[in-house]
Image: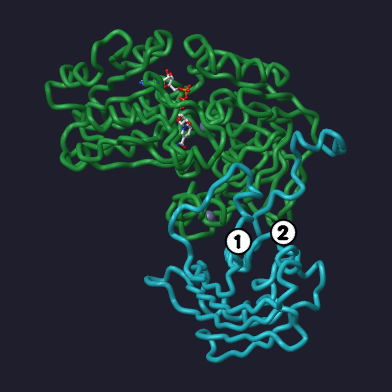
Amino acid sequence: MTPTISSSLPDLSLSEDELLSPMLEPKTKSRYSITINRPIDEVFIFISNLRNLTDVLVSAELRVHDHSRLEIDLKVERANERISFRSTEKSDVEVHGEIGLAHAPADRGTVIALEADYTLPGGKLQEWLGLFSGQDPDTVMQIQLKRLKSFLETGEIPTTAGQPSGRDEEQPGTTVH
Amino acid sequence: MKALCWEGKESVAVHNTGEPRILNPSDAIVKVTTAAICGSDLHLYDGYIPTMKKGDILGHETMGEVVEIGANVKKVRVGDRIVIPFDIACGKCHFCEQEQFSICDNTNPNAVMADKLYGYSGAGLFGYSHLYGGYAGGQAEYIRVPHVDTNSLVIPPGVPDEQVLFLSDIFPTGYMAAENCGIQRGDTVAIWGAGPVGQMAILSAFMLGAERVLVVDHFPGRLKMARDLGAETINFEDVEDVLDEIKFRTGGRGPDACIDAVGLEAHGTSAPAVLDRAKAALFLATDRPNVLRQAIQACRKGGVVSVPGVYAGALDKIPFGAAFAKGLTFKMGQTHTQRYMQPLLQRILEDEIDPSFVITHRIGLDEGPEAYRLFSENKDECIKVVIKMH
Ligand SMILES: NC(=O)c1ccc[n+]([C@@H]2O[C@H](COP(=O)([O-])OP(=O)(O)OC[C@H]3O[C@@H](n4cnc5c(N)ncnc54)[C@H](O)[C@@H]3O)[C@@H](O)[C@H]2O)c1
Ligand SMILES: [Zn+2]
Ligand SMILES: [Zn+2]
């Protein structure tokens, strides 16, 4: 299993769910970097908060399901530069890794590079992936990092959850305006 | 509320849906007064754009009155009359800072999906598939507008909807297409497609100093509209070879810039069957790049090919060798609408331009499904449909 972000076109299919979910084999190593249009100290302070980091590593769905599944020890190796993390014994999922921070060239924000190794306990694997509705840790991490970026840049995370559609005709919504 | 929804290929229906509500603090809810149907909507209607879901609310050319705002909205006020750009931008990311709003980093909730297809995701768009975020569109009585301070143009009282509605898309799109040509005094611009985007591109090319504009299409009604704007026209069904005709009419030199205002559904080729699955659409070159091929071939040496026409997947047999040999420049993409709305509004307010001349049909929401059919089947008569909502 390679830790690279695939550069070739993936197997595509029509629905969003299909597009987002199918990964035949779960990766146990993920790495992903993203550039955030905010100053480095601000980004550092945010992600060195344990709860924020846990949010990045694990999707909301998983935490809703069982928030005790992942507990992380976090260590600031060097302020504004490097944070390492490791799951504790209490966690079902073993994960450890590093986040590096750097100035993007020409004041174009902060680059954060996250590398994580996951060990998925035998037997738990299916269950664990099931909680991500089939998404592998790599995709989950990408989604979470994008959410982090949007939150830091704009103060909110883009969503359409709760908007109307022709699919909700069965339970027509209330008229509010 | 009532909304026009995508039901499947060549099927649009009016549905009763819930009303939108504030989901994020920068949102506003807008009571739609007027909306329009765009040529881009036909790509959805004809099934060319992947990741539509049955029941998705259509529409991205929208204006109306703000009825509710979120806690973080700073500029827009309840009661403001606004035009809403079709592309959704955050106003804060690196690309928004560069005024490249349609490739905003932060508005596509499904960005990971677009990353996988295109390398990196552009902005979310209203009513334009889940690949572009799955946002409910504006062919509805109400619409939710994220980051409304960035995604709005406040219209002064007294200006009719129809005069300003097209600032949401086609006017800026035609303008950016012409601007991308880098027009110099004396230049000739050739435009494929005399649809609303083509018409706005004609206007804009002249505004930006083009000496001549040549327009290619096959609908006499649309070509007449182009001539009324001062363009010279070529009906591709009446000439033996479009390329020869253009070369002859441009002194053997070719147009200085070529605009493809047609996109992936160009007529006039043996089009491959429309494949239903996105997989096929993206791997097997189902876009029909007939016009793009001609534009590349026709363009003079060192010229510009500007592509506002929408493409979604892989293209077959593009004469890249010709582009290389002639040293062409390519410019393309979804319009950075927010960049152009204010300056173009100014031109409308100063009575320099009234883009409403393209409107041929005015309807109510219930007539929407029929209007889609008409716009799809009878383009000579039906050029631009506007829907009165409230
Ligand atoms: N880039 C953007 O942001 C943006 C915004 C709006 C629209 N668009 C795109 O611009 C294009 C035009 O939009 P529209 O609303 O004017 O659409 P439209 O469907 O009304 O017009 C398209 C015109 O192209 C003509 N045409 C088809 N095949 C041709 C050929 N071989 N040669 C010459 N003309 C040909 C048709 O006869 C028609 O008149 C569409 O692809 C639309 O999706 C892009
Ligand atoms: Zn459009
Ligand atoms: Zn942005």
Q: Is residue B41 left or right of residue A161?
A: left
Q: Where is residue A73? Give x, y as percent.
A: 68, 88
Q: Is residue A151 above or below residue B263?
A: below
| Image coords of residue A3 (percent x, y) | 50, 72
Q: Quadrant of residue A50?
A: bottom right
SS label for mark 2: loop
* Label 1, residues with CA under 10 Å away: few <14, some 14-19, many ≥20: some
Q: Is mark 1 within 8 Å of ligand 3?
A: yes
Report the front residue among B131 and B137. Answer: B131
* Left or right of residue B131, residue A71 in this image: right
Q: Residue at x 57, y 47 (%)?
A: B124
Of the two numbered discs 1 and 2 on the same chain, state the one appearing first in sequence. Answer: 2
The residue shown at (74%, 50%) is A161
* Residue B186 visible (yes or no): yes
Q: Which quarter of the frame holds ligand 1?
A: top left
Q: Position of residue B357 (x, y in %)?
A: 48, 17
The image quadrant of residue B250 is top left
Say left or right for A106 vs A11: left
Chain coloured green in the rendered structure: B
* Other residues around mark 2 within 10 Å, as few (<14) / some (14–19) / many (≥20): some
Rendered colour, chain A: cyan
Disc 2: which residue: A133
Q: Quadrant of residue A60?
A: bottom right
Q: Which residue is mark 1?
A: A154
